[in-house]
Image (cartoon, rainbow, N blue to C red):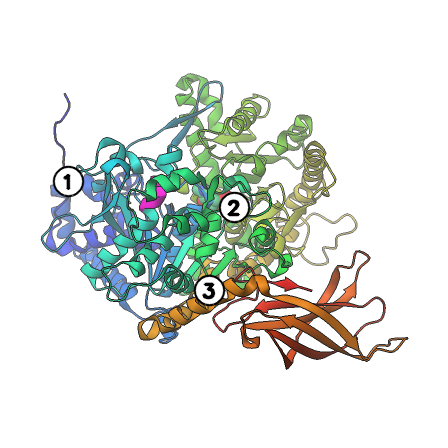
């Protein structure tokens, strides 16, 4: 029989333990150990059965048991203390509250996915986990962030394997009533909703669910509402579901619907309107159009022009790009965008302006496409990549938007990602930090105190975490094999898979091609020899999901799983299906080494290795993403990369060989070398130690924890965002909107004037005097430039002389830049600019002159993409 209606009956808690509801409802429990331990202690078996999900857990406790708990005085007191602690956490001043009024009152953060906890499966991989860690750290620091996203009915898929190792996907449907979410309601009790018009008179309505991530509210839009037609109901059915129109509608709902949801939230809760909008990757880019629509709305007292609204919106927008892989960027057909905007999504905004924002009007661009990252960059005055190297790669990748500028001038900076420490350190590390480093809580670890801890303690802790992983792997492998059709009797071997004393290497991530899941299989015999080595064997734990449409990724998984199925090696190498946060939390602490071998430089940042480092794991990685800037020679190993002239095949050969070599000669021997700490030089045979502990290895662990601990934390990341991006964007936004947007209007008028006159700007003639026949170091050179400015004034521009060493092809290197001063108005829009430079090196010397727009609202010289070179 099927129910015709269903509803969820929420547990009513007796008054003395009522705060349990609040403790379960705020996701802070997921990184606050005392709270999750409370649930566990109430009923360990039921806690495990619930999958560590407080909402499900409380729902499963019987009424009798609840009455019993309510009468347990010690428990009631413990609950009361945790309740008070949560209140203090939610309302007390934290780091951000010390920053003063210059800091934004509120910041909106938009992301298509959020990985906060295994109980809210709304993420596919790195981007989502990062967004989750961003919210959690914002909460810990008191940063007034509001998250905006979508609620997907089936989240991302669940992965299992067929008998022949082919990835199978299932999409279990979530019931929001059983998730830690509350529906945002109007004062009259009806569900608050946003509505977007769609073509052919249809509409897309969505309800707004609220999750509480500590102090940070997260608003999730859900299109599964009765008043939508079926297609509209399914818009949010899956993360990155469907293609084409569905994907576009998801992104319209996220961006435009998200801003509407924020406005409702402000009205209902009295939260201040965001002063900064952060677009986490291109998917959410339409938020900028909705904000322009608000400003151009003819119902306003003085509606703004397109240029004014764009100027105002850009000032307070931050865009973060996350991929150096062009295929990773969302692109739609221009005609698709046109079709949807003609339905009246933003009636007062000219559609051709919207189309121009996403146009690939640069060399190699496709004129039929609408590019979401390009729109993101044009709608944000500040943009960043997610590691230093990724910033550099992004400047190159998007340099077409700033023609005439050197790549290093492209206005994309970088903030290196980090990970939320309390979420990613093992509870044993958290306890250890408290007892050994005297840290109040893991939020405030004094990592350098790890040097004072005896090696034997560290080694015992590492073994204990490794041993937990071994147990977890055995259980997971057994259930995976059952799903693959094996019977219990066939599976006795799984009880002895892996060994808690063998060097354990982890490799887990999504499986796009560039991450090279199967690089380790390049020479199967060599891998086998490493696994079965008589003195220093390794064991490998591998996990990862392939995008359902990616056949190549699925084939890589199949190749790998087939290798792991071999009875000769299957006790030393395992593939675990359905990589998720719950698995990750045991996997990172349990691995001695974290392996990462992407094709450099295609890993934007990568955060897995950071999670490993926090738990005392050592990284073994290609110098890509974060590792490129944080590897220091003593905190792990760098896998050398082939140079650019190698073919893809040669590259894999070279890099796989380097990987095997490191494992054979460095990693394995060091892990198993139990040499005494004193005088443990690199050279010569050493005596075996008496305590059976590899001191050199532990020295690397201590160095890793002490130096990387603070560097990889998401608190450091959040502080960087606040200082480098949020505060400046807030300042610019306040300035530009003050006095009825006076500066926005002036700036927009100025920008239009500059654009209109730019074609007439020209460096007509350049002269230099003062250098003899035989120039010498220290000689002063007077540079004179005759510049035509059309209708612009000298104050509207900067005329620069750039000078340095001239290479054979006349490119300048080691460039210095000086401004020339206007010295004479020559009439008819022509001006004479001069300045003096000093020759500061021997050898070839060259200089050039260029003209750039100048205005105090510009963040970088390249911002407008306008330059005239001599
Ligand atoms: C950390 C993490 C990721 C992201 O890993 P990257 O190294 O950034 O690719 C993906 N999935 C889960 C479950 C994670 O914990």
For the residues labelled 3 and 2, the Cα–Cα distance comes to: 22 Å
Mark 3: few, some, or many residues within 10 Å (few <14, many ≥20)? some
Question: Which residue in the protein does label 3 denote?
Answer: 752
**In terms of depth relative to the viewer, which is nearer, 866 or 168?**
866
Q: Is residue 252 magenta?
A: yes
**Quarter of the figure with the C terminus:** bottom right
For the residues labelled 2 and 1, the Cα–Cα distance comes to: 60 Å
Q: Quadrant of residue 569?
A: top right
Q: What element does badge 2 sit on?
A: loop
The dot on residue 62 is 1
- The image position of residue 394, as x and y in percent, is 57, 52
Relative horizontal placement of residue 594, taking residue 320 as reference (left or right): right
Q: Nearer the viewer, mark 2 or mark 1?
A: 2
Cβ atoms at labels 1 and 3 below 8 Å apart? no
At horizontal 56% and vertical 21% (from top left) the residue drawn is 567
At horizontal 21% and vertical 64% (from top left) the residue drawn is 270
Q: What element does badge 1 sit on?
A: loop
Q: Is residue 375 magenta?
A: no
Is residue 527 in view? Answer: yes
Question: Which residue in the protein does label 2 denote?
Answer: 360
Look at the picture and state if 792 lies above or below 300: below
Q: Quadrant of residue 630?
A: bottom right
The dot on residue 819 is none
Residues rendered magenta in the picture: 249-253
């Amino acid at each position: 029989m099927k129910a015709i209606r269903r509803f969820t009956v929420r547990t009513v808690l007796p008054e003395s333990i009522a705060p349990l509801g609040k403790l379960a409802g705020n996701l802070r429990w997921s990184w606050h150990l005392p709270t999750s331990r409370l649930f566990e202690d109430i009923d360990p078996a039921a806690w495990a059965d619930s999958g560590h999900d407080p909402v499900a857990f409380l729902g499963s406790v019987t009424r009798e048991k609840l009455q019993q708990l309510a009468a347990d005085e010690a428990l009631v007191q413990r609950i009361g203390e945790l309740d008070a602690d949560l209140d203090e956490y939610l309302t007390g001043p934290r780091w951000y509250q010390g920053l003063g009024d210059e800091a934004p009152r509120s910041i909106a953060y938009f992301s298509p996915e959020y990985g906060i906890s295994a109980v809210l499966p709304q993420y596919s991989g790195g981007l989502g986990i990062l967004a989750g860690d961003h919210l959690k750290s914002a909460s810990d620091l008191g940063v007034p962030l509001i998250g905006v996203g979508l609620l997907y009915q089936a989240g991302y898929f669940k992965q299992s394997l067929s008998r022949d190792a082919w990835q199978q996907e299932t999409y279990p449907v979530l019931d929001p009533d059983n998730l830690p979410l509350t529906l945002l309601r109007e004062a009259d009790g009806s569900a608050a909703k946003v509505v977007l018009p769609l073509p052919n008179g249809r509409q897309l309505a969505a309800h707004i669910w609220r999750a509480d991530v500590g102090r940070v509210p997260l608003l999730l839009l859900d299109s599964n509402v009765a008043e939508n037609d079926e297609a509209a109901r399914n818009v949010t059915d899956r993360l990155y579901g469907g293609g084409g129109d569905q994907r576009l509608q998801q992104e319209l709902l996220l961006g435009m619907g998200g801003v509407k949801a924020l406005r409702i939230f402000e009205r209902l809760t009295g939260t201040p309107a965001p002063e900064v909008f952060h677009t986490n990757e291109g998917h959410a880019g339409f938020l900028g159009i909705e904000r322009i629509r608000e400003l151009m709305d003819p119902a306003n007292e003085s509606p703004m022009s397109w240029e004014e609204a764009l100027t105002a919106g850009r000032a307070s927008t931050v865009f973060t790009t996350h991929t150096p892989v062009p295929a990773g960027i969302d692109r739609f057909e221009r005609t698709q965008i046109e079709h949807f905007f003609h339905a009246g999504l933003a009636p007062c905004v000219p559609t051709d302006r919207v189309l121009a924002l996403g146009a690939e009007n640069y060399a190699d661009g496709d004129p039929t496409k609408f590019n979401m990252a390009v729109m993101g960059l044009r709608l944000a005055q500040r943009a960043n990549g997610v590691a230093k190297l990724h910033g550099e790669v992004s400047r190159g990748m998007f340099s077409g938007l700033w023609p005439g500028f050197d790549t290093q001038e492209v206005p994309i900076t970088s903030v290196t990602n980090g990970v939320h420490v309390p979420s990613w350190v093992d509870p044993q590390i958290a306890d250890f930090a408290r007892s050994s480093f005297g840290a109040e809580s893991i939020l405030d670890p004094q990592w350098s105190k790890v040097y004072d801890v005896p090696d034997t303690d560290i080694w015992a802790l590492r073994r204990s975490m490794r041993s937990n992983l071994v147990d977890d792997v055995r259980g997971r492998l057994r259930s995976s094999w059952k799903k693959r059709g094996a019977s219990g009797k066939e599976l006795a071997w799984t009880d002895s898979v892996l060994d808690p004393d063998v060097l354990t290497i982890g490799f887990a991530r999504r499986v796009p091609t560039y991450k090279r899941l199967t690089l380790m299989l390049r020479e199967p015999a060599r891998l086998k020899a490493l696994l079965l080595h008589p003195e220093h064997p390794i064991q490998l734990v591998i996990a990862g999901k392939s995008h359902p449409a990616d056949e190549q990724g699925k084939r890589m998984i199949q190749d790998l799983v087939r290798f792991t199925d071999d009875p000769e090696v299957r006790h030393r190498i395992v593939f675990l299906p359905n990589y998720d946060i719950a698995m990750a939390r045991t996997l990172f602490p349990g691995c001695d080494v974290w392996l990462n071998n992407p094709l450099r430089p295609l890993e934007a940042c990568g955060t897995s290795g950071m999670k490993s480092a926090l738990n005392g794991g050592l990284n073994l990685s290609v110098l890509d993403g974060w590792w490129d800037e944080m590897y220091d020679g003593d905190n792990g190993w760098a896998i050398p990369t082939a140079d650019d002239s190698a073919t893809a095949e040669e590259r894999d050969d070279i890099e796989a060989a380097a990987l095997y070599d490191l494992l054979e000669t460095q990693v394995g021997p060091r892990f198993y070398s139990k040499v005494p700490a004193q005088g443990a030089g690199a050279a010569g045979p050493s005596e075996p130690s008496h305590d059976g502990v590899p001191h050199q290895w532990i020295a690397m662990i201590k160095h890793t924890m002490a130096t990387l601990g603070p560097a990889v934390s998401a608190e450091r990341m959040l502080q960087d965002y606040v200082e480098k991006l949020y505060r400046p964007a807030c300042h610019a936004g306040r300035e530009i909107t003050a006095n009825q947007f006076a500066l926005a209007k002036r700036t927009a008028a100025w920008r239009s004037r500059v654009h209109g006159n730019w074609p007439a700007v020209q460096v007509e003639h350049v002269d230099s005097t003062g250098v003899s026949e035989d120039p010498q170091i220290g000689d002063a050179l007077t540079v004179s430039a005759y510049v035509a400015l059309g209708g612009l004034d000298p104050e509207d521009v900067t005329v620069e002389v750039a000078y340095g060493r001239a290479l054979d092809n006349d490119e300048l290197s080691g460039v210095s830049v000086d401004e020339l001063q206007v010295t004479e108005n020559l009439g008819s829009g022509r001006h004479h600019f001069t300045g003096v430079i000093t020759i500061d090196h021997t050898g070839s010397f060259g200089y050039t002159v260029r003209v750039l727009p100048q205005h105090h609202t510009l963040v970088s010289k390249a911002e407008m993409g306008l330059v005239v070179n001599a």
